[in-house]
Image (tube, helix red, strand yellow):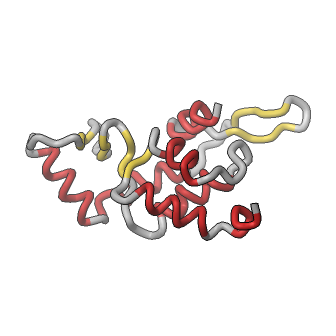
Amino acid sequence: MVREIQRLSSLGVRLANSEDSGVSTREIAESSIIDEVKRHQYEDPILSQYRDAALQKEKTTFKVTPDGVLRYEGRLCVPDITGLRRQVMGEAHSARYSIHPRSTKMYHDLRCLYWWDGMKKDIAEFVAQCPNCQQV
């Protein structure tokens, strides 16, 4: 269920609590972390190199979608700019539907949608710094 909610999130669908029916979708458009990642993707010099290689049709697992977004094996490449990686991890770690998963589960959930170099190590370090997780 978590993966399905994350997939909906990647499509821009936002869920909101509703007092009478539990959960409903929001009808208003709002900026999401996905939009931020897409907007700042090429500010990261390493991702720019991967994009150039993909556009030059070099043998690579990176692809540039028709709307100009860089993906690695279908996953969105997250730049190391303006704390976006930390934002992605924070959103996944503290979301109501996941509630402080351990690093392995969080990694498996995030790797379905996102990619960055050193992702597993970054997630392990992020979870290790969480005060709630340290108490458990």
Q: Quadrant of residue 40?
A: bottom left
Query: Which residue is at the far right?
Result: 20
Residue name at image x 45 percent, y 70 percent: 82
> Viewer-proximal residue, 31 or 84?
84
Residue name at image x 56 percent, y 54 percent: 103
> Viewer-proximal residue, 31 or 52?
52
Q: Quadrant of residue 42?
A: bottom left
At which x and y percent is residue 67?
31, 40
Q: Position of 22 compared to 88: left or right? A: right
At which x and y percent is residue 24?
75, 32
Quadrant of the frame with the N terminus: top right
Residue name at image x 22 percent, y 40 percent: 61
Residue name at image x 21 percent, y 51 percent: 51
At which x and y percent is residue 22?
84, 33
At which x and y percent is residue 8?
57, 34
Q: Position of 103 compared to 73: left or right? A: right
